[in-house]
Image (cartoon, rainbow, N blue to C red):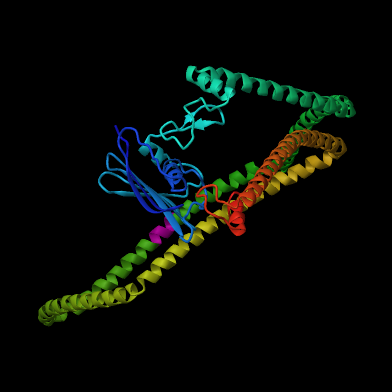
């Protein structure tokens, strides 16, 4: 069983430094009056339950205080407070430290799990701590009022659940009746307002009739478009027929021209045959002249053979030199190309960036071309729309009236919904303001009564030391 083994109070009310050892069974603190017995109980409650709030229990002349509770399993809980800091320190059995802050008036869950010491709820607003008893505190439940006793016993057997359910049910019935009255009043107002729009049914019928007429007109317009296209096709066919008739008229003398063409073909064939024979004869004459020139040139054939042999040797040498020169030229050209490529590759990063820019600009250009195509398509659609609009200009006032009526109906529905939400929000806001005003008045009255009691006593109700008016004002202001 885990229990409180030791309590250490530092600068807490009348205690400069007090260290108390406890037994694991019953512990009773006795001593003369005004010696700090109640401060010990108050310090334990302050550490275990974060009560009371504020910093007025800091010892006079000191700027900080702390209460340390040591449990039998060597776990320590330290509550620390000064003018600007408010901490819980938790030390486990191995000495590991955990710091808790920013909890305000609430008790951290880590402290509840550590101590396992909870208050017993006697009533919805009354609780009691059965582990710690203060001076002059009566036995359990005997000092409470009859209603608190009854509620506590009821909670022991579970009757409070039925009472809470009945109370919540009565509140819900009351709220539902109030909401029903409000809805009935709103319904009457809306019915009165809707009477002004009884003529809308006739307008709806007229609008439906106009929609039917509009559909008929659109159907007829489509038929007109189809007939127009067929008329244009017929005109195109008639024009082609007239053109064909003109060409047929021009081709009446086609038989005479065909006979002349056949005669010309025969004469052309004869001319081609004679021209081929003449060309062959000239070629034979030319061949005879060339043969005579060759025979005349072959008189010095021996000398020509010697020259030819010498030229063959020199030709082979020349071929080798030419091959070596070609290789040299290729190598030199490859070296020049490598140098040129190296010089070009110096700006490779710039080229890559330029390629990226070109790709982006190409993408922008592609998008622009697509948008241009879409723009042309939209212009064509607009042209057709203008044509339809010109033909349907008679329907424009009726369509505008219908659109205006639909817009007003939508606005009316929106306004009715917003008015309902506004009324609900306004009612909730007024009720909240009233509750806040009542609570603030109660707090102000209680603080005034507490201030008057402190001024009359001129003694601190916690440590029973003399207290000044400035200190009283500070205590009162700490509760605001």
Secondary structure mostly taken by the magenta-highlighted segment of the chain: helix
Residue beneath the point at 32% across and 68% down? 285
Quadrant in the picture for residue 206? top right
Start and end of the magenta stretch? Answer: 273-278
**Relative depth, front residue between 399 and 276:** 399
**Relative depth, front residue between 216 and 290:** 216
Residue 286 drawn above or below residue 390: below
- Residue 345 % position (x, y): 32, 72
Residue at the front extreme of this rendering: 32
222 left or right of 466? Answer: right
Q: Is residue 275 magenta?
A: yes
- Residue 264 % position (x, y): 54, 51
Is residue 204 in view? no
Q: Is residue 103 magenta?
A: no
Residue 220 drawn above or below residue 101: above
Residue 434 drawn above or below residue 157: below
**Relative depth, front residue between 389 and 227:** 389
Name the quarter where the N terminus is drawn. top left
- Residue 321 % position (x, y): 15, 79
Residue beneath the point at 60% across and 54% down? 472
Residue beneath the point at 50% across and 57% down? 363
Residue 65 drawn above or below residue 204: below
425 left or right of 189? Answer: left
- Residue 90 % position (x, y): 35, 46
Is residue 63 in view? yes
Quadrant in the picture for residue 401? top right
90 left or right of 210? Answer: left
**Relative depth, front residue between 229 and 463:** 463
How many numbered dots are placed on residues in this image?
0
């Amino acid at each position: 069983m885990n229990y409180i083994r030791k309590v250490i109070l530092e600068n807490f009310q009348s205690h400069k430094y007090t260290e108390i050892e406890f037994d694991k069974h019953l512990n009773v603190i006795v001593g003369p009056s005004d010696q700090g017995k109640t401060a010990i109980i108050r310090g334990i409650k302050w550490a275990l339950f974060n009560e009371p709030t504020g910093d007025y229990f800091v010892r006079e002349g000191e700027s900080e205080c702390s209460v340390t509770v040591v449990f039998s399993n060597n776990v320590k809980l330290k509550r620390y407070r000064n003018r600007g800091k408010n901490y819980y320190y938790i030390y486990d059995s191995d000495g590991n430290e955990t710091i808790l802050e920013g909890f305000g008036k609430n008790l951290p869950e880590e402290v509840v799990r550590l101590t396992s010491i909870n208050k017993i709820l006697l009533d919805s607003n009354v609780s009691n701590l059965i582990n710690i008893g203060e001076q002059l505190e009566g036995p359990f439940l005997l000092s409470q009022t009859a209603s608190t006793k009854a509620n506590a016993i009821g909670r022991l057997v579970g009757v409070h659940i039925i009472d809470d359910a009945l109370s919540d049910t009565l509140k819900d019935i009351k709220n539902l009746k109030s909401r029903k009255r409000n809805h009935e009043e709103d319904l009457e107002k809306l019915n009165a307002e809707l009477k002004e729009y009884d003529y809308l049914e006739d307008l709806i019928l007229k609008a439906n009739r106009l929609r039917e007429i509009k559909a008929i007109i659109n159907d007829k317009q489509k038929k007109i478009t189809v007939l127009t296209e067929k008329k244009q096709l017929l005109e195109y066919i008639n024009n082609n027929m007239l053109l064909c008739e003109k060409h047929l008229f021009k081709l009446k003398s086609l038989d005479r021209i065909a006979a002349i063409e056949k005669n010309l073909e025969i004469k052309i064939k004869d001319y081609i045959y004679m021209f081929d024979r003449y060309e062959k004869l000239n070629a034979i004459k030319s061949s005879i002249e060339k043969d005579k020139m060759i025979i005349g040139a072959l008189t010095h054939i021996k000398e020509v053979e010697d020259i030819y042999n010498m030229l063959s040797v020199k030709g082979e040498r020349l071929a080798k030199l030419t091959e070596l020169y070609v290789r040299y030229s290729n190598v030199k050209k490859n070296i020049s190309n490598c140098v040129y490529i190296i010089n070009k590759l110096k700006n490779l990063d710039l080229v890559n960036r330029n390629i990226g820019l070109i790709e982006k600009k190409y993408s922008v250009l592609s998008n622009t071309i697509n948008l241009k195509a879409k723009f042309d398509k939209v212009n064509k659609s607009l042209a057709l729309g203008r044509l339809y609009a010109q033909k349907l200009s008679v329907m424009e006032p009726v369509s505008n009236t219908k659109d205006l009526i639909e817009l007003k109906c939508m606005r009316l529905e929106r306004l009715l919904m917003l008015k309902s939400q506004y009324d609900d929000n306004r009612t909730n806001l007024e009720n909240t303001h009233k509750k806040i005003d009542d609570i603030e008045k109660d707090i102000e009255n209680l603080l005034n009564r507490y201030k008057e009691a402190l001024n009359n006593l001129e003694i601190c109700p916690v440590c029973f030391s003399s207290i000044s008016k400035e200190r009283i004002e500070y205590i009162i202001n700490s509760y605001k």
